Image (cartoon, rainbow, N blue to C red):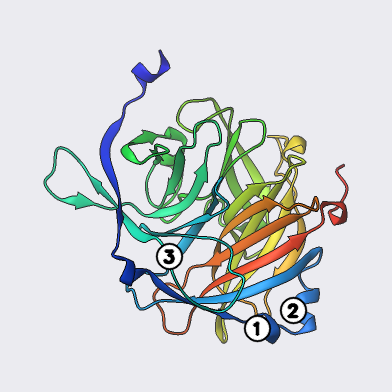
């Protein structure tokens, strides 16, 4: 019955695939260039691989979300709604990957419209893809097979500033969802704002909360760990010389008290010149030896001085700080 009372904006979404010749991607290994200091700064994470991805396709790049798929592949989605699917690289070379763009057609208009993807989460309950948007108080849901898509309002997002949408979004292991605002709270002392949903965004009760991240860093993605805690990828921009830096922190939402901001623990720094980039997407996948593979993908912003990079880290959960 709840569906009857939720206003919907119906759209038709096509997963438009480009011709195969447009899907060529050059994979170059950068792993050997990473010095010991940069590896040590990763804390409990061990650098497995660092790849540079490049393509002559003008739609390639700008990736702000990374989604692990049941097939073993990953889905990367850009802020211009480009996408490509890939299996984890094992060697350098040129490969042809499924690549395309998401086009949205609103039935009451003749032209196609796009939305700015900032976060993407696959719901294991039904295989649907949920997308956090820039400058929009809706979330988009795309069915497992594509086709009809819907935008659901999330009224609590109305209070968030421009360029402060659901930059980081995650589905927790218990079915709750969390969103983190990139710019809310002004970052004073590391303070940011978040939303904790009892279920799917737009369909469940929501609780606002504060969270403390490293000062000067904003959240750009979040993924749950098997123990229920949350890995959060944060980012900052420095001017001299211009560069991005990232840090990974750990949050325990079981300790959330709405009366005070939730503290986090810093785990890793991605700041050395050999490793740093504008990493915005993060995904976690269990490995056969009871460890975790953590993947990061960067948004090159269509700038010549930036690159699309894919970083693979290994994490032994036993090396994480103990739950308190």
Where residue 97 sits: x, y (%)?
43, 65
Give the answer, above or below, for where 41 lies relative to 322. below
Apparent side of residue 256 relative to residue 83 in the rendered image (left or right)? right
Q: Which residue is mark 3?
A: 97
Q: Residues within 10 Å of mark 3 (few under 14, many from 20)?
A: some
* Residue drawn at (70%, 44%) of the image: 261
Q: Disc 1 vs disc 3: which is toward the camera?
A: 3
Q: Extreme left residue here?
A: 110
Label 1 sits on residue: 274
Q: Earlier in the sequence, mark 2 or mark 1?
A: 2
**Who's the residue at 66% across and 57% down the image?**
190
Circles 2 and 1: CB atoms closer than 8 Å: yes
Quadrant in which the C terminus appears: top right
Query: Can you give x and y, in whole percent of width and height, for residue 319 in the image?
Result: 86, 56
SS label for mark 1: loop
Depth check: give the residue in front, 53 or 188: 53
| For residue 147, above or below residue 290 | above
Residue highlighted by disc 2: 38
Q: CA distance from mark 2 to mark 3?
A: 30 Å
Side of 25 where 34 appears, left or right:
right
Examine the image and state in which quarter residue 37 appears.
bottom right
Q: Measure the C-alpha gap from mark 1 to mark 3.
A: 26 Å
Q: Quadrant of the N terminus?
A: top left
Between 72 and 143, the one nearer to me in the picture = 72
Is 14 drawn above or below residue 298 in the view shown? above
- Packing grade of label 2 (10 A; few <14, some 14-19, many >=20) is some
Residue 117 place in picture, x, y as percent = 41, 53
- Circles 1 and 3: CB atoms closer than 8 Å: no
């Amino acid at each position: 019955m709840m569906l009857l009372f939720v206003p919907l904006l119906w759209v038709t979404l096509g997963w438009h695939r480009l011709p195969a010749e447009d899907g060529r991607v050059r994979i170059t290994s950068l792993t050997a260039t990473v010095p010991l200091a940069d590896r040590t700064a990763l804390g409990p994470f061990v650098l497995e691989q660092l790849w540079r991805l490049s393509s002559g396709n003008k739609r390639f790049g700008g990736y702000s979300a990374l989604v692990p798929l049941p097939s073993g592949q990953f889905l990367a989605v850009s802020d211009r709604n480009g996408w490509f699917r890939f299996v984890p690289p094992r060697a350098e070379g040129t490969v042809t990957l499924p690549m395309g763009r998401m086009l949205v057609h609103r039935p009451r208009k003749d032209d196609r419209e796009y939305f700015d993807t900032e976060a993407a989460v696959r719901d294991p309950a039904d295989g649907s893809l949920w997308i956090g948007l820039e400058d929009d108080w809706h979330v988009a849901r795309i069915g497992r097979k594509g086709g009809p898509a819907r935008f659901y309002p999330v009224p609590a997002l109305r209070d968030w500033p421009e360029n402060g949408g659901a930059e980081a979004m995650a589905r927790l292991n218990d079915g709750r969802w969390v969103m983190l605002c990139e710019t809310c709270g002004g970052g004073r002392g590391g303070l940011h704002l978040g939303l904790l949903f009892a279920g799917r965004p737009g369909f469940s009760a929501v609780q606002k909360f504060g969270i403390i991240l490293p000062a000067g860093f904003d959240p750009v993605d979040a993924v749950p760990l098997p123990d229920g805690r949350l890995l959060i990828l944060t980012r900052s921009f420095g001017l001299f010389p211009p560069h991005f830096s990232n840090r990974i922190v750990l949050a325990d939402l079981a300790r959330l008290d709405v009366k005070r901001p939730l503290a986090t623990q810093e785990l890793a720094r991605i700041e050395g010149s050999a490793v740093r980039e504008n990493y915005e997407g993060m995904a976690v996948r269990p490995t056969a030896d009871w460890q975790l593979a953590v993947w990061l993908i960067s948004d090159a912003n269509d700038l010549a001085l930036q690159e699309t990079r894919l970083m693979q880290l290994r994490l032994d959960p036993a090396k994480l700080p103990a739950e308190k």
